[in-house]
Amino acid sequence: MKTIDWILRIVASAILLQTLYFKFTGAPESIYIFETLGLEPIGRYGSGFAELISAILLLSPRTVPIGALLGVLVMLGAIGSHLGPLGIVVKGDGGLLFGLACTVLGCCLVLLRWRWSQLMSFLPGQPSP
């Protein structure tokens, strides 16, 4: 179980970190996505920052549930954008970005489920795990 936990954390973090290069360097695909959504450049930088924080939190055992929750929220936005104005295939990528978002969402949902009690312990008045 511990090995699977680490694999899920590494897969989600690696995908999140890999996309940062494109967001922060202003790759044409990233600019196209956020212009289509009417959120360029604030949305591109904002989502990149949220993904960076999520990836960092996922790699620290104590903060995994917070990173997973943030990852779920960010990926729901990404998937919603793909199901809406962007479409599944963006600029001929064959649905790769959509697939990566679904992968991160799946990893984060499993991690969140496994660590739900740990997440609840972050709330005021709750005992530590």
Image (tube, grey):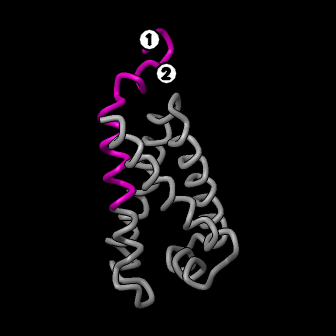
Q: Quadrant of the C terminus?
A: top left
Indicate the amino acid at tag 1. Answer: Gln
Which of the two residues, 76 or 18, is positioned nearer the viewer here?
Answer: 18
The residue pinned by badge 1 equals: 126
- For marks 1 and 2, give the CA distance: 7 Å
Q: Is residue 128 left or right of residue 40?
A: left
The residue pinned by badge 2 equals: 122
Mark 1 touching mark 2, by CB under 8 A? yes
Residue 104 picture location, percent across and down: 39, 56
Residue 102 picture location, percent across and down: 33, 62
The answer to whether residue 106 is magenta is: yes
Residue 34 picture location, percent across and down: 55, 74
How many residues crowd mark 1 within 10 Å: few (<14), some (14–19), many (20+)? few
Residue 90 picture location, percent across and down: 42, 83
Provide the major secondary structure of the magenta segment: helix
What residue occupies the far front of the structure in this picture? Answer: 3
Picture residue at 52% right of the left edge, 78% below the top: 33
Indicate the amino acid at tag 2. Answer: Phe
Q: Quadrant of the N terminus?
A: top left
Above-or-below relation of 82 to 101: below
Q: From which residue to which does the magenta span run?
A: 103-129
